[in-house]
Amino acid sequence: MADQFDVVIVGSGVAGLSTALAARGARVAVVTRGVIGLDGASSWAQGGVAAAIGPGDSPSQHALDTLKAGCRRNHKAAVRWMAESAPEVVRWLVDIGTEFDRIGANLALGREAAHSFPRIVHAGGDASGAEIMRALRAAVEMSSHIETFEHCQVRELIKLNQSVVGTAVQNNQGEAFELYAPHVVLATGGVGQLFLNTTNPPECDGSGLAIAHRAGAELADMEYVQFHPTALAPAQPGQGEQLLLITEALRGAGAQMVNEQGLRFMLAQHEAAELAPRDVLSRAVWSQLEHGHVVYLDARMLGDSLRQRFPTVFRSCQQRNIDPRQELIPVVPAAHYHMGGIKVDLHSLSTLNGLYAIGETACTGVHGANRLASNSMLEGVAFGRVLGERLARMPKPARIPPVGLGIWREPNKGAPISEAMVFARLRQLMWSCAGLVRYEDALEAAVDQLQLLERRCLNGAKVLDQLLVGRLLVEAARRRTESIGAHAIAPRRPQVSGQAAA
C-alpha cells in the first residue's frame, strides 16, 4: 500500500500537532506509535509554557535567561525569535481552547529555576501538558486536512535523488506500507528511554534520530542530555521504569532539598540554592547519592495547598503511601530532555532536502548546553506553527512515483540474543557511563561494549536503533573534553563510600 500527501509528520506531541494544525490547506498525514496526542512526553509535561507576559518582564530578559541557562552555547537568533514569539504562542493556545490557570481574568504565572520572573503559564496546577494536548487533540479531530495513522512506526525514510520523499511505515500487526510527501517532518521526541532512570515514556527511545542518521542527516550536540533533579525515587532501585517527575514549580513555591540527615545541601552549592540551574542541582543530588546519602524534597511547608496547586504530584505520592504534607518525598535524578538532535536551520530544515525536524527531536540551538525550564513546550509550538504555515504555502509538486521501501530493512526473526535483554543492558550502560557525570575511561569502555552489542544483533532488530543512538551519544561525549552545562566529564570515577542509586 502507498499513499501521497503534501506533508508527512512523524510524532503527535505538542510539536507535531502544532505543525499539522498550522499546515491548513495542505493534505497532512500524522503517524504516531500510539494514540494521537497521548503517546510521547508532551502529555506528561507538568511545568507549562514560558512567556514574558508579566509585570516588569520582557522577551529580552527571557532570552537572556535562556542564554545563561544554556551556557551561551545557544543559537542567539533562534533564542531571540523564540522569546519574542512566546506571547503569541500563549494566545494561540488559548484560542484553540487551552484552559490555562487564571487569577481572576489574568493568566496565573509560576516561577521555575533560572527564570528571573514568574513567567510560566500553566494548567491544572502541574498538569499543563495534559491540558495543552487535550486542546491540540480536539483541534486535530476537527481538522479535515489531517489524516492520522495510529499505532504505526516509521522504520526508515525513503529517498529519491538525494531528497527525502516519504516514509516506510509498519503497523502493530507487522504490516508495511509507504507514505509519500515532498516534506517529511520528524517530531519523535527525545532519548530518555536509553537511560535506566528517566521521566520519559517508552516512545522516547531515539528512533527518529536513528532513521535520520541512517538516511544521511547530520546530528548535533548529542552529548547534551538534561537530567531532572527531582523524579520520584522508584520503590525498588534498579527497576528501570519511567519515573514520575516532581515538578520544578514545587521548588519555585518553596520546597527544599535535604538528605537523610536533614542537611539542606544546596545552600553550599549555589547562590540560588534549590532554584539553581538543573544541571547544577542534578549533579549535587548525584554527588549525595554517590556518597551514600538519600535525597528528599521537603514540601511540608506548603501544607494543604499541595493538593490544589500540585494535584499530580500529590496523587502520585499518595499512591506510594507518602503524604507530602507531612512526609519527605524521596527523589533521584532522571534523564529528562535532550538538547541535541537532528541539526536544523531556523526554518527547521535538516541537512537533507525534504526532511525537517521539530521539538525535542530537533537541534535548533535554542537550548544550548542546558535547557531553561518550560522552554520545551514553547519551542515545539513556536517552531511547529511557523513550519506548518510555510509548508502549506509551498507549491504542490507533481506526484512522487513509488520507489519501494528503499533502505528499509525487513526485520529478521530469530535474533541470537534477546532484544529485551540487549535494551536492558544498554540502559544500565548509558546510566552508569553517560549519565550525570561522564568519566573518560568509562566512556571508552562503553563504546566497545555498544559496538559488541550491535554486532551480536541481526540486521533488522529494532534495538539496533537504540544501540546506534546510544553509541553516537557516547562518542559525542568522548569528543567533548570540557565540562559545560549538562555535560560533565572527568578522567575517572572517584573512590567514594556508598553507591549511586540505580
Image: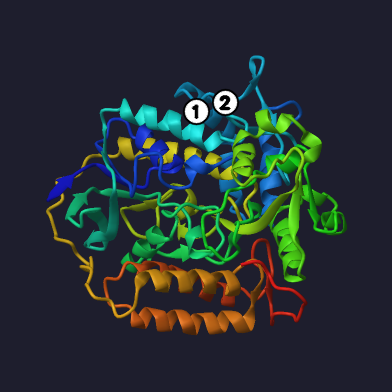
Q: Amino acid at mark 1?
A: Leu
Could you tell me which residue is drawn at 45 percent across and 52 percent down? 189
The residue that mark 2 highlights is 100
Could you tell me which residue is drawn at 61 percent across and 54 percent down? 74
Instruction: In the displayed orientation, state which residue is furthest to the front.
Output: 321
Answer whether residue 391 is visible to the viewer in this image: yes
x and y, in percent, of residue 166 in the image: 24, 53
x and y, in percent, of residue 434 in the image: 58, 71
From what the image shows, is residue 182 above or below residue 217? above
Mark drawn on residue 93 = 1
Whichever of labels 1 and 2 marks the residue nearer the N terminus, that label is 1
What is the quadrant of residue 443 in the picture? bottom right
From what the image shows, is residue 357 above or below residue 48? below
x and y, in percent, of residue 210 in the image: 38, 64
x and y, in percent, of residue 444 in the image: 56, 83
What is the quadrant of residue 396 in the picture? top left
Relative to 346, 366 lies left or right: right
Q: Amino acid at mark 2?
A: Phe
Relative to 11, 368 lies left or right: right
What is the quadrant of residue 4 in the picture? top left
Could you tell me which residue is drawn at 23 percent across and 48 percent down? 181
Alpha-carbon distance for marks 1 and 2? 9 Å
For numbered disc 1, what is the local secondary structure? helix
Mark drawn on residue 169 = none
